[in-house]
Image (cartoon, rainbow, N blue to C red):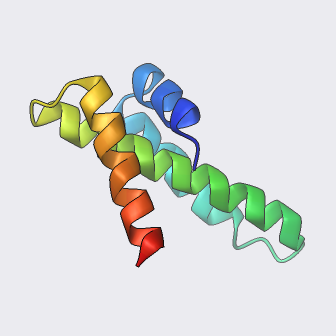
Amino acid sequence: MKLPVIKTIQRSCTPEQIETALGVLEAITEAPSLKEPEIDVIGELISNLCGALEVHEMIADGMSEKDAGNAFMKKVLGSIDR
């Protein structure tokens, strides 16, 4: 996950657009001809899209964009440290 990518997605897409993109990417992962590196890239895209959705939610709940991004990354790093 990359915070700059998440911020770019969050700023330029609505939650509905992000959800549509997630659906498309998830459907693509079912293609039998995909190679492991391609699946890894799609997984990274899905992670960034999910992060953007979470940041959208935090902002909708009243948090500033900066605080929402920082809170999301702290959550991610906290889950890695466990």
The residue drawn where x is 27% and y is 36% is 68
Residue 2 seen in this snapshot: yes
Q: Nearer the viewer, residue 27 or 40?
A: 40
Q: Which corner quadrant holds the C terminus? A: bottom left
Extreme residue in the left direction: 62
61 vs 52, left or right, is: left
Among the 4 quarters of the image, the one containing residue 55: top left
Residue farthest to the top, as pictured: 12
Rendered residue at 37%/65% (across/down): 78
Question: Does 17 appear above or below 29?
Answer: above
Identify the residue at image location x=20%, y=24%.
64
Q: Position of residue 18 (x, y in %)?
A: 45, 40
Q: Position of residue 30 (x, y in %)?
A: 70, 73
Most foreground residue, 23 or 70: 70
Quarter occupied by residue 40:
bottom right
Residue 36 percent coordinates (x, y):
85, 72
